[in-house]
Every structure is written in structure tokens, then in C-alpha cells.
Image (cartoon, rainbow, N blue to C red):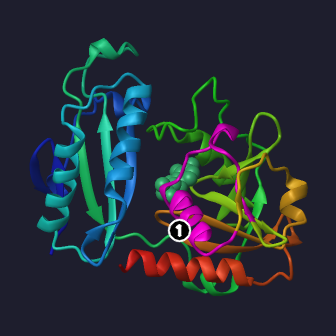
């Protein structure tokens, strides 16, 4: 079945799902988005994603023309219209079309877009054997410039780091914050394991507070694994016993090499495997 895309309350075939070239989402990256996942016909952590979308919108002073409840219903209805059991959802709200110029008052009609499709993030083999990443020279946006907690349509910061990663032959790149601390990867959060303790940077390190991140922290706590959110440096990464990334698209993926250095034994280790399995179970519940 051809994918049906929701735009402002109507469903369109892929070829007809279009918005204006005057939209400030296109012209200036002025808008917010979410990536969600459908498992077994159910949207994973829909409430959390909708909440983050509305927080992002509020932070950039963008008023979404739906209540959070209406938005959640629209997402579910679009998934249903696509008869999707397993898939990926891209939820986008732009500032809308207007005249040229940055002033958000020049726009009218924010565009609410819901795309339901498929996504394959990394080759399956890397989930078994682990992935390699490098540290990008491009630092994560300074929180006082554009706070990484906002999931905005302005992803150039991440794309610049991704370009560095790809040029180094990797699928992902580690980004540090303005203090030189570990922040996150270009589209994934990072976790370390040291002496049986799970560690991940705190939200105020200048990261997107991932829905998957929070789910994995809950799973770890439920399994009796201590969880900490300290400031982390590359020293902590290089000396970690285990490392993995989390994200809606990536799920849980082991990292076995960073900047050419093997992490731990250089193979996916037990806590990573345990949390990967627990996350898989959670999405099938
Ligand atoms: N960090 C960044 C920069 C992201 O774009 C994402 C989402 N792709 C994540 C982390 C992971 O967040 P989530 O688990 O909510 O998908």
C-alpha cells in the first residue's frame, strides 16, 4: 500500500504530500519534529514524544494548532490509515508559509505533518558485533545559542558532525559540548558501563533527552543496575568497560571502538546485551 501522509487533518498519497516553498520550516529551519516508532501496530511511548514535541514548540514560541491529545489521536489515526504494524513515524510542525524574512509573525498556519514509513538505521551486523564511532571536531550547539533539548528542524549542527563521522568511515560521530564534555552522538544518546554502573550525560550537558534513553534507564533500574548521570569526558569513554547508543531509529546499538580505541574487550559486553534484550522485550509488550 502506498504511504498516506497527514497534512493538517487530511491524508495524501506520497506524491501529493506537499507544502509551500515559502514555509519557514524550509526557508529557515523554523519548526520542530519528532521521530517515533510503531511496534506491533502500537506507537512506542507516544505520550512522551508528544510531550517533548510540545516542549520544543513552546521553547521556540511556536503555537501548535492542536491539543496534545488531538496530536496523539492524529498520529494513531495516520498509523491506522497506513495499516502499519512495524514502522517509523516522522511528526513535523513548521512555522508555516509566509513572506520572506525571519520574523515569525510573517507566517500563518503552522503545518502539521505526519509521515508513516520504514527506517533502517544501521546494518544488522553492527547490532551483533558492535559499531565504531569517532569524536567530531564540531561541538554540540551551545545551550545558550540553540538548546539541544529542542528537537528543532535546525539539524545542521548534527549534520556537520555526521559528515565528519562519515568521512572517517563511521556511521555515527560523538559530539562534545562547549565544555569539552561528552554530550551525545548526532542522532543518538550515549551510555557507558564502568564497574557495573550505567552512566550517561545529564540533560544539562546539552543533549536531547531521548525517549529511548529514558526507557533504557528505567529498564536498568528495574534490573538492579545502578544508573548515574555524571558529566563525562572522553577519558571515561576510552576507559569504559562497555559503550552503547540509544535512539528511536537506532534502538540500542553496541559501540566497540571510539577514535580507533577498542572499548572494553572490543566486543559487545553483557550489560549492553542485557539492556538490548530488555528494550526489545519492552517494545513487544
Ligand atoms: N539525540 C539526538 C540529537 C537525536 O536527534 C535523537 C533522536 N534521533 C536522540 C538523541 C535520541 O532520542 P530518542 O530516543 O527520543 O529518539
Q: Dot 1 surroundings within 10 Å: few (below 14), some, or many (20 or more)?
A: some
Q: Is residue 209 magenta?
A: yes
Residue 19, compared with residue 44, is above or below; it is above
Would residue 206 be found to the left or right of residue 192 on screen? Answer: left
- Position in image of residue 36 (x %, y %): 37, 59
Instruction: Give the residue drawn at x 70%, y 79%.
Output: 271
Q: Is residue 142 magenta?
A: no
Residue 142, compared with residue 176, is above or below; it is above
Q: Is mark 1 within 8 Å of ligand 1?
A: yes
Choose top left, top right, bottom left or bottom right for residue 124. bottom right
Would residue 35 be found to the left or right of residue 207 on screen? Answer: left
Q: Over which residues does the magenta segment extend?
A: 198-225
Choose top left, top right, bottom left or bottom right for residue 168. bottom right
- Position in image of residue 254 (x %, y %): 67, 75
Nearer the observer, 33 or 42: 42
The residue labelled by disc 1 is 250
Instruction: Give the residue drawn at x 85%, y 50%.
Output: 233
- Position in image of residue 80 (x %, y %): 14, 67
Callout count: 1
Instruction: Give the residue drawn at x 59%, y 62%.
Output: 217
Instruction: Give the residue drawn at x 54%, y 38%.
Output: 149
Nearer the observer, 48 or 254: 48
- Position in image of residue 140 (x %, y %): 68, 40
Of all residues shown, which one is farthest toward the left?
A: 10
Q: What is the secondary structure assignment of the residue under circle 1? A: loop
Would residue 284 be found to the left or right of residue 168 on screen? Answer: left
Residue 98, compared with residue 223, is above or below; it is above
Where the C terminus falls, by quadrant? bottom left
Amino acid at each position: 500500500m502506498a504511504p498516506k501522509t497527514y497534512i493538517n487533518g487530511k491524508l495524501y498519497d506520497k506524491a501529493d504530500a506537499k507544502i509551500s516553498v515559502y514555509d519557514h520550516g524550509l526557508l529557515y529551519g523554523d519548526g520542530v519534529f519528532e521521530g517515533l516508532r510503531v511496534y506491533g501496530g502500537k506507537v512506542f511511548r507516544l505520550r512522551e514524544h508528544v510531550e517533548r514535541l510540545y516542549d520544543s514548540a513552546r521553547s521556540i514560541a511556536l503555537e501548535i494548532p492542536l491539543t496534545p491529545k488531538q496530536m496523539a489521536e492524529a498520529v494513531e489515526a495516520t498509523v491506522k490509515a497506513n495499516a502499519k504494524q512495524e514502522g517509523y513515524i516522522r511528526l513535523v510542525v513548521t512555522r508555516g508559509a509566509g513572506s520572506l524574512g525571519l520574523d515569525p509573525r510573517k507566517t500563518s498556519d503552522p503545518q502539521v505533518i505526519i509521515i508513516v514509513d520504514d527506517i533502517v538505521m544501521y546494518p544488522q551486523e553492527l547490532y551483533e558485533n558492535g559499531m565504531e564511532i569517532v569524536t567530531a571536531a564540531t561541538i554540540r550547539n551551545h545551550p545558550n545559542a540553540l538548546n539541544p533539548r529542542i528537537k528543532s528542524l535546525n539539524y545542521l549542527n548534527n549534520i556537520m558532525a555526521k559528515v565528519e563521522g562519515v568521512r572517517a568511515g563511521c556511521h555515527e560521530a560523538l559530539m562534545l559540548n562547549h565544555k569539552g564534555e561528552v554530550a551525545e552522538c548526532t542522532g543518538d544518546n550515549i551510555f557507558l558501563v564502568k564497574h557495573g554502573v550505567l552512566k550517561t550525560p545529564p540533560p544539562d550537558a546539552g543533549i536531547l533527552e531521548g525517549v529511548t534513553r529514558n526507557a533504557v534507564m528505567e529498564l536498568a533500574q528495574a534490573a538492579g543496575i545502578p544508573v548515574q548521570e555524571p558529566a563525562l569526558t572522553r577519558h571515561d569513554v576510552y576507559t569504559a568497560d562497555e559503550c552503547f547508543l540509544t535512539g528511536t531509529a537506532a534502538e540500542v546499538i553496541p559501540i566497540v571502538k571510539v577514535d580507533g580505541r577498542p572499548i572494553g574487550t572490543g566486543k559487545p559486553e553483557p550489560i549492553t546485551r542485557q539492556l538490548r534484550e530488555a528494550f526489545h522485550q519492552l517494545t513487544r509488550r
